Image (spheres, rainbow, N blue to C red):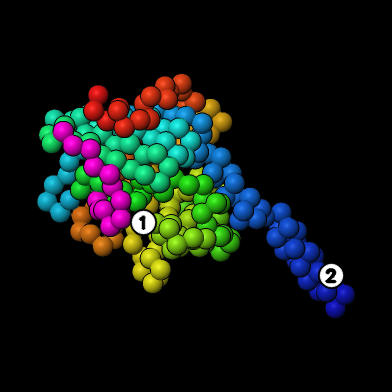
């Protein structure tokens, strides 16, 4: 009897060890997430709905994106925001308003300001670096969100210029996209959350096409981003990513 019990215990220990050995490392998981999130080029038409305390408003935009360094966005609707443009080159950001006919460089404390009154800051717009480059990571556990098994990763910023000192991300085990995120200040205070409502497949990549961002320090029900169309690996003229494009 004792031998039988000992045998069962050894089998359980061996099975647990095998499961541990088969689990990918946090770095491997982040590599797969980055491959999904940072393609060569993409052209996106999207709607951003800002749910404020009293009402909601929706802004439509079109973005041309090249890798993690270059992005150009033009706001299409409503009329009040039509023609506002934004250019990102590396860690530099400019906005142009047709009302004032002025181009403004967004830097310093301005990076923490809200974009169009949303729950996203300009700093969030710049946070396109590959996660593995920007954060140390470890697998903190596993959890099922809806019907999707996820790894829980804890990320700690490698450098002081990261928008968030730490993040907690729930990564879909099959699709390698984040389905939920919590973003923290250096003090450990929760600043923002991200919840993915829908994921679609485009070619060999999985794309989050409906996301709710929430600045927990603000009132309101968050900002919902919905992708209306996306063109992957599209040819984009280099002239799009220039300050001259802001005034066209």
Q: Residues within 10 Å of mark 1 (few under 14, many from 20)?
A: many
> From the viewer's perspective, is 219 left or right of 215?
left
Residue shown at 25% from the left, 46% from the top = 115
Front one among 127 and 44: 127
Residue visible at 47% across and 40% down in the picture: 68
Tell me, yes or no, whether the highlighted magenta stretch contains residue 70.
no
Q: Residues within 10 Å of mark 2 (few under 14, many from 20)?
A: few
Figure check: 142 above or below 203:
below
Instruction: State the residue position of label 1.
Output: 193
Front-most of residues 67 and 153: 67
Q: Return the residue at label 2.
A: 7
Residue 91: x %, y % from top left: 40, 46
Task: Report the residue at 44% width, 45% height from top.
Answer: 128
Residue drawn 56% across the image and 64% down it: 140
Secondary structure under badge 1?
strand
Above-or-below relation of 42 to 25: above
Residue 139 percent across, percent down from the top left: 58, 60
């Amino acid at each position: 009897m004792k031998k039988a019990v000992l045998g069962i215990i050894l089998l359980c220990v061996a099975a647990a060890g095998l499961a541990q050995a088969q689990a990918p490392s946090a770095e491997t998981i982040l590599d797969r997430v980055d491959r999904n999130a940072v393609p060569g080029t993409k052209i996106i038409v999207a709607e951003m709905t800002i749910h404020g305390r009293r009402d909601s408003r929706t802004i439509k935009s079109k973005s041309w994106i090249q890798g993690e360094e270059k992005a150009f966005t033009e706001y299409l609707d409503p009329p009040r925001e039509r023609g506002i443009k934004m250019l990102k080159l590396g860690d530099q950001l400019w906005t142009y308003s047709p009302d004032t006919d002025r181009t403004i460089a967004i830097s310093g404390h301005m990076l923490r300001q809200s974009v169009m009154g949303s729950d996203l800051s300009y700093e969030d717009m710049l946070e396109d670096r590959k996660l593995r480059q920007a954060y140390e990571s470890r697998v903190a556990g596993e959890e099922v969100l809806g019907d999707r098994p996820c790894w829980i990763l804890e990320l700690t910023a490698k450098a002081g210029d990261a928008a968030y000192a730490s993040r907690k991300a729930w990564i879909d085990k099959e699709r390698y996209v984040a389905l939920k995120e919590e973003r923290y200040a250096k003090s450990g205070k929760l600043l923002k959350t991200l919840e993915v409502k829908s994921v679609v497949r485009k070619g060999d990549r999985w794309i989050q096409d409906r996301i709710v961002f929430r600045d927990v320090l603000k009132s309101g029900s968050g900002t919902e981003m919905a992708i209306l169309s996306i063109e992957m690996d599209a040819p984009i003229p280099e002239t799009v990513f220039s300050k001259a494009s802001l005034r066209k």
